C-alpha cells in the first residue's frame, strides 16, 4: 500500500453544494475502509479545491477511487493531481 496526497480543483460553488452530501458520504465510507486518512477543502482565497490523503495499492486503484467520487461523477472536479507521500513526523492512519 502507498499513501498519496491528492489535490482537487473544483468548479462552481453551486455545483459543489449540490454534490457535497454524496461526496462526504463517499469519503466517509472510504475512511471507514482505511482508504482515506483525511480530506478537506482549502480555506483561503485561492482557487476552490481540496486536499485528500488516500491509501491505495497503486496509482490505478487511486485513480479508480477518484473517478468514483461524486465530485468527479457529478462534473464538479475540474482537475486533480497527486503525489506519492510519506508522513515523516506525525502519524497518518492506524
Image (cartoon, rainbow, N blue to C red):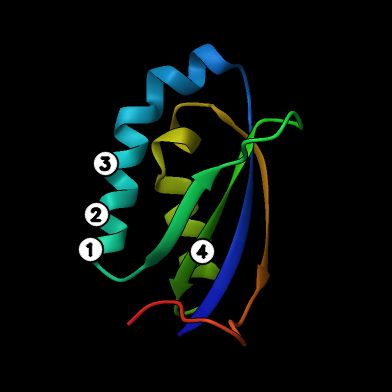
Q: Earlier in the sequence, mark 4 or mark 2?
A: 2
What whole-number distance in Å separates the C-alpha atoms at marks 4 and 2? 14 Å
What whole-number distance in Å separates the C-alpha atoms at marks 1 and 2? 5 Å
Q: Quadrant of residue 41?
A: top right
Is label 4 in contact with label 1 (beta carbons under 8 Å)?
no
Label number found at residue 93: none
Q: Earlier in the sequence, mark 4 or mark 1?
A: 1
What whole-number distance in Å separates the C-alpha atoms at marks 2 and 3? 6 Å
Camera-side residue of 64 and 14: 14
Q: Earlier in the sequence, mark 3 or mark 4?
A: 3
- Neighbour tally class for label 4: few under 14, some 14-19, many 20 plus, Cα within 10 Å: many
Q: How many marks?
A: 4
User: Residue tagged by mark 2?
Assistant: 29
Q: Is residue 60 above or below residue 79?
A: below
Q: Residue at x 60, y 58 (%)?
A: 6
Q: Residue at x 48, y 47 (%)?
A: 67
Is label 4 in contact with label 2 (beta carbons under 8 Å)?
no
User: Residue tagged by mark 3?
Assistant: 25
Is label 1 in contact with label 2 (beta carbons under 8 Å)?
yes
User: Residue tagged by mark 4?
Assistant: 53
Is label 3 in contact with label 4 (beta carbons under 8 Å)?
no
Is label 2 in contact with label 3 (beta carbons under 8 Å)?
yes
- Neighbour tally class for label 2: few under 14, some 14-19, many 20 plus, Cα within 10 Å: few
User: Residue tagged by mark 1?
Assistant: 32
Q: Position of residue 40 (x, y in %)?
A: 50, 46
Q: Earlier in the sequence, mark 3 or mark 1?
A: 3
Q: Position of residue 61 (x, y in %)?
A: 46, 68
What whole-number distance in Å separates the C-alpha atoms at marks 3 and 4? 16 Å
What whole-number distance in Å separates the C-alpha atoms at marks 3 and 1? 11 Å
As drawn, which residue projects farthest toward the right?
Answer: 46
Q: Quadrant of residue 1?
A: bottom left
Amino acid at each position: 500500500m502507498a499513501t498519496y496526497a491528492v489535490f482537487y480543483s473544483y468548479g462552481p460553488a453551486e455545483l459543489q453544494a449540490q454534490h457535497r452530501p454524496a461526496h462526504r458520504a463517499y469519503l466517509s465510507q472510504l475512511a471507514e475502509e482505511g482508504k482515506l486518512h483525511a480530506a478537506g477543502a482549502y480555506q483561503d482565497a485561492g482557487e476552490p479545491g481540496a486536499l485528500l490523503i488516500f491509501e491505495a495499492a497503486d496509482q490505478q486503484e487511486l485513480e479508480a477511487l477518484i473517478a468514483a467520487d461524486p465530485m468527479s461523477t457529478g462534473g464538479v472536479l475540474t482537475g486533480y493531481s497527486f503525489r506519492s507521500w510519506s508522513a515523516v513526523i506525525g502519524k497518518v492512519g492506524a
